[in-house]
Structures are given as structure tokens and as C-alpha cells.
Amino acid sequence: MNWCRFEAGGRTSWGLVEGEVVSEVEGDPFAGHRPTATRHRLDAVRLLVPVVPPTFYCVGINYTDHIVKSAARRGVEPVFPKKPDIGYRANSALVAHGEAIVKPADSGEMFQYEGELVAVIGKRGRYIPKAKALDHVLGWTIGNDVSERTWQRGDRTMWRSKNADTFKPMGPWITTGLDYRAMETIIRLNGQEVDRFATANMIFDVETYISEISRYMTLQPGDVIWMGTDGLPQNMRPGDTVDIEITGIGVLSNPVVAESARPPMD
Amino acid sequence: MNWCRFEAGGRTSWGLVEGEVVSEVEGDPFAGHRPTATRHRLDAVRLLVPVVPPTFYCVGINYTDHIVKSAARRGVEPVFPKKPDIGYRANSALVAHGEAIVKPADSGEMFQYEGELVAVIGKRGRYIPKAKALDHVLGWTIGNDVSERTWQRGDRTMWRSKNADTFKPMGPWITTGLDYRAMETIIRLNGQEVDRFATANMIFDVETYISEISRYMTLQPGDVIWMGTDGLPQNMRPGDTVDIEITGIGVLSNPVVAESARPPMD
């Protein structure tokens, strides 16, 4: 099933996507829902960010190839994580499938996508054993962890580099019933493939992260965990379109535009 | 005015605290509200976290004395921030005034409070000049940025050290109409004063942070910005009670308890 949040006729609802049709439901996939008779054409609704998480977790570095190649590009030794440390991103940065990624006026050339699998938590939990971790996942969606690399090196935290407005596209929907170990992630810049990797080729897998987080924190329905990216991301320029496909889920596609001149702030 | 969120008779509402009385309102301080005739005794309601923020901002280091003393304790040179870099905390860690801070079973001795002023955003904004920054603040509350120092040094991010369940007490309410430059922060451990500092003695002030954040991010009603702490925090042990008072707002008080044994997770 593909769960989406959408706007149609001025109302926000949850729905199930099948082919080109969205079947509206009452309620939501977390607290409970029931079908309605209302149908929409997929191309006639506005897809929203599939969930605004209570807590937005993100794995910074979780694929070997990404670490090796990024370090080589910077001329430094690769550093591999020794344990599954989780980080956070800001809800203020979320945008939906189809919405523009705005490149800030003062950002540099190294403005890059990162295609990531997103686990959406469906069931509250604490002290979750690895063997039961996937029972807490409602489904899977796609994230683009947009990053400004110059800021990423210079900011004490990664607030601007990873969390400026529009830097966190997520969508198009949440797909249930999939085996994430069978997925492939394909990234296309202006229609041309720039990276392809086995989604499950992670240093610490989804089960490990869910279990580790839950040693210290209560996972809530709607929480998201972005699982990191592989490969060596390329620069995005205004006018580009970046597509992140994950097999079984679909495609998250976003155009890149330039920020218009900033108003004076002093 | 003191805006609180509370539970009484199984319902969650917003209210205005005056002395020992809570006057219930319909709506909330952000989207609009109107008075009701319902009154509660303050000691008969359960105060909740005053707001669950869309985005939870936190300033890591923002007071000179805290930086100097913390560095001396660790035997390293103090490092002062050169620009206002903001960080994030997790909503999952929030607890209200009066609720217990749970010391994790595997945490160390260096388990410490940090008393902080919290600015609560009332009005959406982007590109906010410093001179207009305080127009975007609904009011002020108090935060305790509970920190496990051993984890803080060893974790690649500060996920466990600053964001385990119950590590972010906030409350007791949001006070409007105050001048934060006139406030004093007083911290008491088991009733004994352990620190006292001028709340406004910040390296980068509230106006600077609001303006800087808004260069890159849209601030939303309900967002909170925790402004950092001064002084040299002491260790907390199960059985202790920590009170953070900020003059004009009130007192955020939380007992410390030990986590009971963890269930097996393998």
C-alpha cells in the first residue's frame, strides 16, 4: 500500500495511491482509519510531505563507499563510524515531492543531493530488540538530504548546511509491506543516472538503529529515520531536477531554483 | 500573562495562570483564543510541556563563564564560538515541570543540569531584522538542558548525551511581556543555590539568533530557542531535585530518579 497525505479542494487528507487514483480515507495510518467513497486523480491532488515527524532522526554517515569517496575528494583519511550514533534534522526544512529546492543566495558550488531510504515508525516503542525492530516500521519513503558542503565544514553544528528551508525533500508517499534489503537506490540528475547502490548496503542496518535509539528514547508513531546515502554526490545548480528512485517505493523528484535576492535585514 | 498547557478531567487545554488559579481558554495563544468561564485550582491540574515545538532549536554554548569553567574542568583550552551556530534537540526528550528526570542505568557520574532561558516563537517569520526580532517572541519559559558528559564527549553527535527520554524538562509556563535583559537565572540543587547569573549575559543575544536563523529558515509559531547556560553545572544523583528559577517567569522543578533495570533486548 502507498499511504499519501494530500491537499485537494482546500482540505488535507490521507489517502491510498493505486496507479493513477488516490482513495481518500478518514483518519490516518497511525491512529486508525476507514475508507471513504471519495476518489481523486493522482495528478489532480497536491502531494504533501507524507508525515511531519514528532522527532526527525537522521543517520549522518552509514555507507562505506560514500565515506571513502567523500574523504578522497577532500584529501583526508576516511573515518568510519564505530557505533550507530543518530542525529537530528529540522522539520522546518521539509518539502514534498515536486516542490522546489531553493539554493540560498550565499551558498557555494558544492550544493548537493543525498538520496536516502526513510523508515517511518508506526508503533510506539522503547527497549525494542533487533528481532522485533521492523514490527515498529509502518513503511518506507524517500528523502533527499540536501547539503551545502562549505557550510558543513565551517558551521559548528550542521544547522545551515543540512537544514535551511527546502533542504529536506521527503516523499512521494509511504509504502508498506516491502523488504528494504531487496531495494536499489537510483539517483538521476536531469534524467541522467549519477548513482546507483544497494539500499541495504549499510554499515549499521535499520534494525540496529531502531534498537539502539530505543535504548534511550521512546520512538513515536510518525517519527522518521533517514538512513544515509552511498556514492559521491554531485553538485546541483538552479534549473536542475533531481530524482531519487528507490525500487518498490517510487520516485522523489524536485526541481532546484535560485533564491531571489534577500531583503535587507539591518 | 502566564500561558500554560494543562490536563484536567482527562482533557488537555490552554489556560492563563494567575496566582493559584488557572483560567481555561478555548483555542491557543498562537492561532487565536477566547476566554471561558472555567476556573481550576493550579494545584489541581497537571501542567504539561507548555508547547511541543515544530522545530526545537538550542544554542550549545553561549555564555563565557560556562565555556571557561567547563574547559578548565576538562583541562583543555576554552573555545569561544565565532558566530551564532544553532543546534537541535529532540521533542521525544521533553518533560513538564514536576515530572521526573530519569538517569539512565548505563550513564555515568557526570549527569548534569543546565538552566536555560527559552524563547517561544509566536509569529511566523523569515528574513527578520534584529530590530524586529522580539516581535516574533510570544514569551519566555525555562529549560533544563540535562547532559551526560561522558556520552557528550564520546558520541559523534550528542544524541544520547542531550536527548535521552526525560532529558529536556521545559516549563512551567510561557510568560509574556517580560524584558529578558532584566532577568536573573538561579539554580538550586536540593534547595541549595548552586549557580546564579544574569540571563542576558550571552555571547550572542536572542535578537541575533532569531535574525540569523531566519536568514535560512522560516521560524514557526511554537518553535522554541533554548539560549544556553552559564556557570559550571554540578552532578545530579537519583533522589535530588533541581530547580531552575528565572526571575519574572517562575521555577521549573524536577526530581531525579534512577532508571529501573532494562529489559533484555537481544
Image (cartoon, coloured by chain):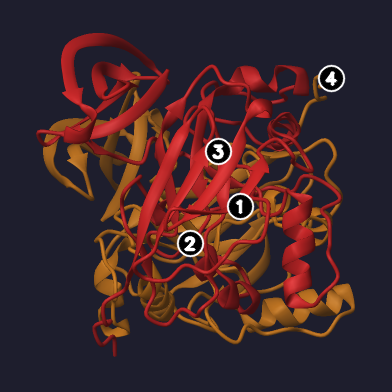
Chain colours: A red, B orange
Question: Would you name the residue on which mark 3 appears?
Answer: A118
**Image label count:** 4
Q: Chain of mark 3?
A: A
Front position among marks 3 and 1 = 1
Amino acid at pointer 4: Pro
Mark pair 3, 4: CA separation: 27 Å
Residue A225 appearing in the image: no
Mark pair 2, 1: CA separation: 23 Å
* Residue B145 shown left or right of residue B251 in the figure: right
Q: Secondary structure at mark 1?
A: strand
Tell me if residue B3 comes above or below residue A165 in the rendering.
Answer: above
Of residues B160 and A99, the one nearer the viewer is: A99
Amino acid at pointer 2: Asn
Residue A232 appearing in the image: yes
Asked if badges 2 and 3 are on one and the same chain, I answer: yes
Mark pair 1, 4: CA separation: 40 Å
Tell me if residue A73 comes above or below residue A84 in the rendering.
Answer: below
- Residue A255: % across, % down: 35, 58
Asked if badges 2 and 1 are on one and the same chain, I answer: yes
- Residue A34: % across, % down: 29, 9
Amino acid at pointer 1: Asp
Return the mark for residue A195.
1
Mark pair 4, 2: CA separation: 36 Å
Q: Chain of mark 2?
A: A
Question: Would you name the residue on which mark 2 appears?
Answer: A163
